[in-house]
């Protein structure tokens, strides 16, 4: 190339194309299965938010609430201790979340350590395992055997854990 000519040499273009190709491969390999991973992370966050909503409703109204993890039917729902469904603040209606369809088509509830699949919050917001006090932590729900949502006794603190294979 002459001193005053501008542009790229063929070798520079080939090197740039190789780098772009490698980066593209890495991105596709890393994020190739993102839809399912995003669903698992998203529903775990949604469950945490919904359980917090049940706890806050119990605390603010001084009326107990219940969170049911219905593993057999791949859904969860929130009720008052009277048996009536809590109203879903996002669109109204009964607070029932059906998994395995729509935005969460790949999500399956695969387990819970709750007695009868039920977590209660008393009128002060304290968590109970189907009406009984518990100590330590309980697995609220396991999702596709890849993530679990755990609840802590007394405080009701919730956390999401990855399950190592």
Image: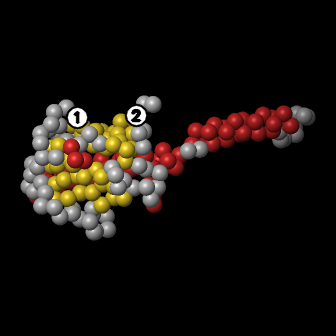
- Residue 77 sits in which quadrant? bottom left
Residue shown at 86% from the left, 37% from the top: 10
Q: Is 152 positioned to the left or the right of 12 in the image? A: left
The residue that disc 2 covers is 163
Q: Position of residue 16 (x, y in %)?
A: 75, 37
Instruction: Tell me: 61 left or right of 101.
Output: left
Task: Please name the residue shown 33% across and 58% down the image.
Answer: 97
Report, in whole angstroms, how far the alpha carbon at label 2 lies from the one at label 1. Answer: 16 Å
Is 84 left or right of 142, judged from the image as shown? left
Instruction: Indicate the position of residue 25 as horizontal and vertical percent values.
Output: 67, 39
Spot occupied by residue 36 in the image (x, y as percentages of width and height): 50, 47
Name the one closer to the observer, 108 or 126. 108
Which quarter of the figure is the C terminus placed in?
top left
Q: Residue 137 carries which label?
A: 1
| Helix, strand or loop at mark 2 | loop
Marks 2 and 1 close (CB-CB < 8 Å): no
């Amino acid at each position: 190339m002459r001193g005053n000519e501008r542009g790229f040499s063929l070798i520079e273009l080939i090197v740039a194309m190789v780098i772009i190709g490698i980066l593209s491969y890495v991105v596709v390999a890393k994020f190739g299965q993102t839809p399912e991973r995003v669903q698992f992370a998203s529903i775990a966050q949604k469950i945490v938010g919904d359980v917090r909503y049940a706890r806050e409703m119990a605390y603010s109204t001084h009326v107990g609430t219940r969170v049911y993890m219905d593993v057999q039917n791949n859904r969860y729902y929130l009720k008052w201790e009277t048996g009536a469904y809590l109203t879903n603040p996002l669109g109204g209606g009964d607070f029932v979340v059906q998994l395995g369809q729509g935005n969460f088509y790949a999500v399956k509830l695969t387990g819970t350590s709750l007695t009868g699949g039920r977590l209660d919050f008393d009128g002060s917001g304290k968590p109970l395992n189907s009406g009984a006090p518990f100590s330590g932590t309980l697995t609220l729900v396991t999702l596709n055997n890849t993530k679990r949502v755990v609840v802590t006794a007394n405080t009701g603190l919730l956390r999401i854990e990855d399950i190592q294979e």
